[in-house]
Amino acid sequence: MERDGVERLLAEAGVDGRRLRHALASLCDGRWWTLATLVRHTATSRRTIESLLGVLDLERSGDRFRVAETHRPAFQDLLAVAPPPEDPVGHLVPHYEAVLDRLRELVAGAPRARHTLDHVAATPDTILRRALLLGARFWLPGARLLCVGDHDLTSLAVKLVHPETDVTVADVDDRILAYIDEQDLGVCTRWADLRLTLPASARDHDLAITDPPYTPEGIGLFVARAVEGVKDDGRVLLAYGASERTPALALKVQNALSALNLAYEAIYPDFNRYFGAEAIGSAADLYILRPTTRTRPAAAARLDRAATAIYTQGPQSVESAPAADAPAQPEGPADLLVGDWPASLPHTRVKLSTWLAKPYAATVERVAIAVPAGLEAALPRLLLATRAAHVEVHLTAPPAVPAALAPVYDFTTSGTVLHATRRPLPADPEGLLLRRILDNGHAKLANSWREGLIAAARAQDGALTKNEARTLIRQTAPWSDALSPVEAPLHRLTTLPTHIATTLTLLHTPL
């Protein structure tokens, strides 16, 4: 009998039966459901929902289903008698319908998810409610918020709801950074592979929010980077979800958080909803974490031993084996090795993270860099981090030549090896100024630009003050403040020559 199967499932679930009762009540309310929408609506794992559907005789229409009206009376005494815990900001959502409509458009138009980065899109309603919760719990006028990864576009939701908030995004996906900048909402974008570094210009924030890969390694790394990006009295908001069937995995993640010595100020259950992630009920809790005096040393220690395998899929998944095709030795002579090379090689070496974080102290002519699978997005930045005459980069697949760096290097490829030879300095003012900026990869882009403009004016028997040069740059490229070339999104580097030409033209225009 149909009811017997339902009663058996409820008995097996015990106190966790509320999820099943909520799902049963939804199936009996007359609406049509798909598997994905029912999972997301009830925040219950796909396997649990499928177990309930397996014992019900459902009315179907295509891929939609519901309990037939004639069957509903048989289940009335089994339904959940109270709704799930109340959404803390649900009462505010109806006041932001126009914003929600805009967010629906933005989420629909966003770049497609990359499974190798564990991308799963949050719903427009979720990112709106994140923005509302931030404003309900914290004073946002003048506050600085860091989005540690932002495939969900939370940054745009915050700027639409709280335009007075200073929002910065640090993300490894150049497509996301370009899309956010296209919206022209005043979000600052920074390229960052958090497995390697957090940009220097992404520090000293009041708040940070992150929705990282849901592995203990991913959670530990992203939250440690978030700690690195906030003040001592800041807060870190974390989205994390696990299936009701896997408490041991949730424990591993929470142990990773506990190791960072963070205080738990709040946990909002099932606050986040997603298009996908049905194994965890298409839902995740929202944690509010507060650093203690012991947090920053713990985060620094966690980052010192950071591994790059943090995802659930792809070459950088936690279950992936170390690459068997790592380079045995450079093809040509090298003064310095960057990345993981055999210990037997008699060369000076430096970590990829150190290479990106700060200039190498000594002058070197030839550098060999090993880039493991999954870190290819760092290639342009690894090349910008040096002024060596020749750079030999070993990858695990034939490399894509970074077009934005064509003014700096001549490129040749040999299988999976990229050879980059630094080009002579150009004679034209635009090319010379561009090289001045790109040859100083760790310096503030606007500072190199400013000094180059002053030099260009002097070469034309003119004079330009630092303040006048800053005004020209901000008028042309307001995004350039505090940004270094190694932190710059690729679309900013690609359009840089055009902006440089504009400022050189404005040298002859009265300010």
Image: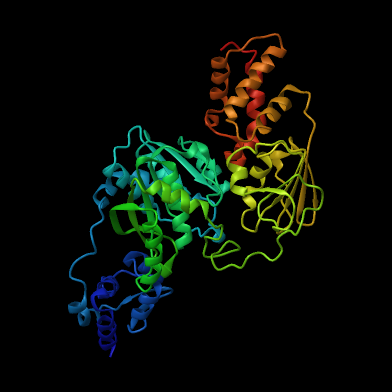
Left or right of 130 in this view: 494: right
Tell me the quarter of the image containing the N terminus: bottom left
Left or right of 413 in this view: 297: left
Left or right of 386 in this view: 108: left
Q: Residue at x 54, y 23 (%)?
A: 475
Q: Nearer the viewer, residue 139 or 158?
A: 139
The answer to which quarter of the image holds residue 160 is: top left
Q: Residue at x 47, y 51 (%)?
A: 301
Residue 180 point in image, percent of width and height = 50, 42
Tell me the quarter of the image containing the C terminus: top right
Q: Residue at x 38, y 57 (%)?
A: 257
Residue extending furthest toward the bottom: 1
The total of numbered circles placed on residues is 0
Left or right of 345 in this view: 373: left
Q: Nearer the viewer, residue 215 or 21?
A: 215
Residue 361 point in image, percent of width and height = 65, 36
Residue 341 point in image, percent of width and height = 69, 56
For the question of whether residue 139 can be seen, the reply is yes
Residue 143 point in image, percent of width and height = 36, 35
For the question of whether residue 104 can be seen, the reply is no
Q: Nearer the viewer, residue 61 or 274?
A: 274
Q: Nearer the viewer, residue 341 or 401?
A: 341
Q: Is residue 284 above or below residue 183?
A: below
Q: How is the image coloured?
A: rainbow
The answer to which quarter of the image holds residue 456 is: top right
